[in-house]
Amino acid sequence: MALAGMFVGVLIGVVGSGGSGADKAAPPAVTVTQTVSATPGEQAVATSASSASRAALAFGDTFKFTSSDPAKVFEAGVTVLGYRQGFTSVGNASEEAGEPGYVWAYADLRLCVTKGSFTDDTTSWTLYYSDGGRVQRSGTTYGDFPKPEFPFEVTVTAGKCARGKLVFAVPGGKRPQSVLYAPKGVAESKEWAVPTG
């Protein structure tokens, strides 16, 4: 009888602790809702990196965005004008990447502001690959990098633009699927498809 009582007590303890442990281990459910507005004639574009091939803009297309903070109103637009892979430099891309087979590449970028002012930096830009890999901009700069270089950090005011080339150390055997722009404080991100050739 004492043994049966002890068994029931252990069973209750296991069930009780298993239930509370499961509650703590389960992540909370999160629903994210996003509204993407498009200008007339422009298709609304999904922003997930996994859908880059069907959602990406073409080079030369401008992504327009506004402030989500009513205390700092601005209207701005960014454009990827081109991508080139395989230029030479006195610096070694493989040494920067820490792996053999890397080469230098750059994206030609333009940021313009039509209202207010907007501050951005180069950490907003990433190269996205079809296998899910991402490459951040180069952490170094050399005097023979293509000019003009895109500013590391820049504040652009209404009616002005910043344009330049942003360099990346990339795996030489493959090309990125897209150039991804995800600035801080802006709800959306956008991608531009990189041509395969």
Image: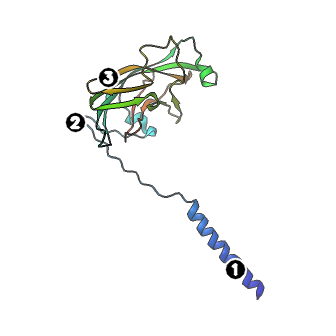
The three-letter amino acid code for the residue at tag 2 is: Pro
Residue occupied by mark 1: 9
Q: Could you say which quadrant of the image residue 96 lies in?
A: top right
The three-letter amino acid code for the residue at tag 1 is: Gly
Label 1 residue SS:
helix
Disc number placed over residue 40 in the picture, else none:
2
Q: Position of residue 15 (x, y in %)?
A: 64, 73
* Circle nearer the viewer, 1 or 2: 1
Q: Which residue is found at the position 37% from the left and 31% from the top?
A: 119
Please determine whether, in this image, residue 190 is positioned above or below residue 69: above
* Circle nearer the viewer, 3 or 2: 3
- Number of marks present in the image shown: 3
How far separated are the C-alphas under marks 3 and 1? Answer: 72 Å
Q: Which residue is at the front of the view, 197 or 166?
A: 166
Mark 1 or mark 2, earlier in chain? 1
Mark 3 or mark 1, earlier in chain? 1
How far separated are the C-alphas under marks 1 and 2? Answer: 68 Å
Q: State yes or no: discs 1 and 2 in contact (Cβ < 8 Å).
A: no
The three-letter amino acid code for the residue at tag 3 is: Cys
Label 2 residue SS:
loop
Quarter occupied by the C terminus: top left
Q: Which residue is found at the position 56% from the left and 19% from the top?
A: 103
Mark 3 or mark 2, earlier in chain? 2
Q: Residues within 10 Å of mark 1 (few under 14, many from 20)?
A: few
Label 3 residue SS:
strand
Q: Which residue is at the front of the view, 155 or 133?
A: 155
